[in-house]
Each structure stands twice: as C-alpha cells, then as structure tokens.
Amino acid sequence: MTFFNNNFKAYLFLSFCALLYFFPFFITGKNTIFPIVDNLDCYYVWNKIAAQPQYAWANPSAIIAEYMNGLPRFTLINSYSLFFFLNIFFSAFYAATIHIILIHTIACFAMYAFAVKYLTRGNIIAAIVAAIVFGFREYIYAYGLSLALLPLLAMVFINFINNKQSTKDWLFLLIYPFLSNFQSVGIFILGLWFVLSVYFIIAKKLPVAKFFLALMSMGLLYYANNYPTLNNLLFDSYFISHRKAFAVNSIAQRMGNILTTEEPHNLDFYLTFIFDRKIFVLCGFILYKMYKSKHESFKLFLFITVAMIFFQCQFIILDSAALKYLQEKVLLFRMYHFNKLFVFELFFQAMAYAIIVAYLLSVFKTKWAGIAVILLMLPFVVRLSLFWKPIIGLQWQTKARPYQGYYSPDLFEQIKQRIALPVNKYKVASFGIQPAVASYNGLYTVDGYINNYPLTYRNQFREVIQEDLALINKQFKFSEFDTRGHFCYLQTVDLIKNGNMQIPIDKLNPISVPQEVHWNFAALRSLGCNYIISSIEIKTNQVELIDRLENHFYKLYLYKI
C-alpha cells in the first residue's frame, strides 16, 4: 500500500487510532467506564490517598490512618511511580485518564518501532497490526508502563547482543525500574535478563561485564524504589506480612474454583489474556510453509508459537506438583503469585501477529490486501476498547463501572452529613459496595483490599467473618480469605455468587433479597467500627438503620452498630 511508505505516516495513522480508541472520554467524561479489578477497587484509591500532602513525602513507615485501621504508607504505594506523580499534579480522575492514555499510546508506538525493525522485515502494515494488537489491549493499569515498554526493552537487549549499546540504552535501563512494577513484572524482567545473558554470553562468546552491570544496575534501582516492601517480606521489617499465611498453591485453587463456577464474569476476567486458540491453526500452517521454504523468520516464529503454547498451559503449571513442592519448602515461593508471569503473553501475541501478517502480505502481493488490513484495523480498535463498549452495545457490566458512579461522591457527602461528625471520629465498614469507595471519599475504614498488611490484622478481621467463611467454604470448597486474604471484606455466600467480591453490588448487579449475616459484631466493634455502609439490606438485630440513601448508581443503607 503506497500511502504507508514511511514511518512518519505509520505513526500518524497510529495517532489517529489512539484518538479513536479514547474518543469515548470526550463524550462521557467522568462517566467513562474504568476496569474494576485492581483499578477502581484499589490502585486509584491507594495513590489518591498517598498523594495527599500529609503523606506524599512521608517516611515509608508513616501510618496512613484512613485505610484499614491504619497501615504503613509503603503497603499502599511501594514506590514513587509515574501514577503517584500524576496524582500529585492532577485530580484523581484526570490522573487515571492521563495514565491510561500514556500506557496505551506508548505501548502502541513502542511495539511499532520494535516490529518494523526486527519482525516484519520493514513491512509497515504488519508492524501497524502488531502495534494495534499490543497497544490497545486491556491492561492491568496498576502495572504502570511495565508491559508498555517491553518492546523498547527488547530492542535494548538486542543492542547489547550486537555490541551496539549506546548511552540511550543505558539511560533506558536506569529509568525502567522507576516506570515499571517490580512485584508484577520487574522480578521476571531481571530473571529473563539473567537467563538470556548467560545464554548469549556462552553461545556468542560475548563479554560478561556489560550484561551483568546492566542487571546489577536495574536490580539496585528496583531495590532502592521498593526496599520497604522487600525488607518486609524478606526480613519481617515493620511487621509480619499476611502473605506468610498464604495457602500452598493459592492461585491455582482460586483459578480452579472460578473456572468451575457458573458466573461468566469471573471466567471472563481470568481469561482476559487467553489467546483465541483458533490462531494456533494458522500458526501451524504458516510454520509449515516457512519450514518448507526455509523462511528466515521460521526459528523466531517457532519460538514465539512455543512461548504462546507455554502461556496457554498456565493453569497446568500453577497446579503442578513441582510448584507445590517448592511452595511447601520455600516460603518465598508461597508468598508470590506466579500467575503474573503470564501477562507477558500479550507481547508474544503481538509479535505473532506481526510475523503472520508480514508473511501473508508477502504471499498476497496486491495493494488491496494491504488496504483491506488497514480498513479492518479501525473497527478492530473500537472493538478492543473497553471505553467504547457501552456506546456500541457490548457487554461491559461484569468488568467495569463508570468512574463517577462507582465512587459517587455526591452520595457519600450525604452520608457524612447524616453522621454529622468529623471523619476522624468514627470508622466504617462496607458491605456489597466495595470499601475502596468509602476510602476514596475520605472516610476512615476498617476493611479494604490490600496486597500486603499485618498478619495480626488478618487474624483480627477473620474473627468478624469466620462464620460466613465457613458457609462460603462449605458451598464453594474454597475461601479467598483463607487462601490469600487480600480482601478484608464483610462477605456472605450470596456476595460471592454475585461477583466473588470483585463486582460491586449496585443497580447494575443488585441483590434485592435482605441478607442474613453471621458476623461477630463484638469483634467488629473491637476494630473501632461504628457504621456499616451497605448496598444490601441486612437482616440482624445487631445494627440500627440510620438512613436510606440513593442516587442513579447505588441504593445504600447506613447502619449504626
């Protein structure tokens, strides 16, 4: 296709695709939908709280009193990330919006640069396809630019292999630890850098020093930016983490439970990154053709295909006897969620698309083939965008909520007025509605979603919900709280059925039947809890209904204990 005859025009087209992808923001504003899990329900709130003037530059061990009865600052945000600084300079909504735009745009442009140089033999259209597939997929935004920058990191490593590393490459390696998430992605980056370095040093007899200097530099910078959490998990600094009570193979148990339930939204969430298996038929066919013609990309494409098959086997790997053995013998293996490794599948999928499209366009050498591919990309961008789904009538309610509706500041202002006390003079718990909403609106909470907190508090909170946990375990043969414990939520069997605590109970996902609860209210009071904010009517004589409040998104009950 003659129009796409240089990189400038390709970047121009990708810029248009980015505008198309984010166009719903201009229509819906603060009613734009955002992902719930690991975004609305925690990440945005952690950074909003930590960016407040009294906490922004505080010591990592400074106690943030508002969240879960008071937690050290480093448990909410472990480092000074890009998103943290966006929350310093912008309001929470605009910080989240800018962060999302940066992640997708950088991922798109970075993948194009990598694909056109190393994967498509200069085929610009194939590189555009790879850029769109990689840049406009749904991300876990809490990972920051970890995944978005992978193509550039790969280019840097290739420069090291070819002895062409420059000052820019070294600068990128020094900046990357501050733009990426160590626990979710960085730890694997260091491991892969080490393994690949050893391989190429042996295979190509490359100098050792530069590879391991780069590895040590990144490792030290990751440690400098994450030392409170690392010291806590490795040496019990500050407190003993609840992660030390993780069940062996807790992730596999959780995924196995979800895959066998009838709730399709849970299945959808855990299969977000699963590649359409039909593509493997095409991969196999193209591999065969490449092998027969001795195509120069055969070995690379074979490696990518094998890697994708490995990612498809994630549940088998997570449930393997070998991993269970390691978790039983080594506490560190039990504390870590190895399922995070599989987010790298996105990168391999995009590389596969680059090579497939480049190969097909080399076979079908008509300009109409290129035109067809480009025209197909525009509706594909819209289809990939979560933000377009309400506009074009696709299902979104099981994974996202409108930003303004989810946090409902108007409704929580009414709650504050109804309680009529300074917010630091009482504490609340939430039921049905996720605790992040109360935290976002400045209330002091005893509950919440957090990845690292004191084991003693986990045990205290368990006393509150232990009877309902027994009922949940009896029905589902599994309890999230007892295997991992990240969700310190008031819960019942029906709450688990309606979204496994990851989907809020609201007007999009209501529970209309009053809930009989079995909570230990004495234990709840001992945590300092005075009020319960519920989106479900509660049946118990242990609480007094103070008020019913309603807006377009929630119907809430305010109870006093």
Image: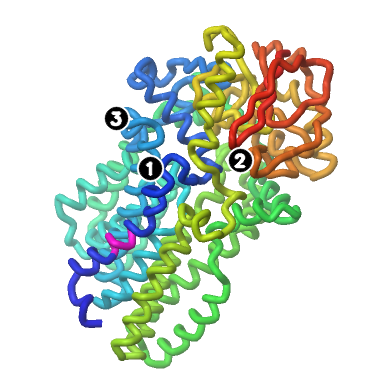
Look at the magenta stretch and give its main secondary structure.
Answer: helix
Find the magenta span and give its range: 14-18
Mark 2 or mark 3, which has the lower sequence index?
3
> What residue is at 64 percent from the left and 44 percent from the top?
508
- For label 1, the crowd category at 10 Å Cα-Cα, with few meaning under 14, some 14 to 19 and many 20 or more, is some
Q: Nearer the viewer, mark 2 or mark 3?
A: 3
Point out the tag, 1 or 3, that comes first from the N-terminus: 3
- Of 529 and 538, which appears nearest the observer? 538
The amino acid sitting under disc 2 is: Arg
Q: Quadrant of the C terminus?
A: top right
Relative to 524, residue 468 above or below: below
C-alpha distance separating marks 1 and 2: 35 Å
Residue 550 in percent (x, y) is at 63, 29
Mark yes or no: residue 324 visible. Answer: yes
Residue 286 sits in quarter: bottom left
Q: Kindly identify the residue that appears in the image at 69 percent across and 24 percent down.
A: 557
Residue 499 position by quadrant? top right
Does 528 sit left or right of 15 as displayed? right
Question: x%, y% of residue 248?
Answer: 68, 42
> Does dot 3 land on a helix, a strand or a loop?
helix
> Label 2's element?
helix
Tag 3: residue type?
Answer: Phe
* Mark 2 → mark 3, Cα distance in angstroms: 38 Å
**Horizontal and vertical percent for residue 134?**
39, 61
Which residue is tagged 1?
Answer: 97
Kindly identify which numbered label has been placed on residue 89.
Answer: 3
Q: Which residue is mark 2?
A: 334
> Tag 2: Cα neighbours inside 10 Å, few (<14), some, or many (≥20)?
many
- Residue extending furthest left? 167
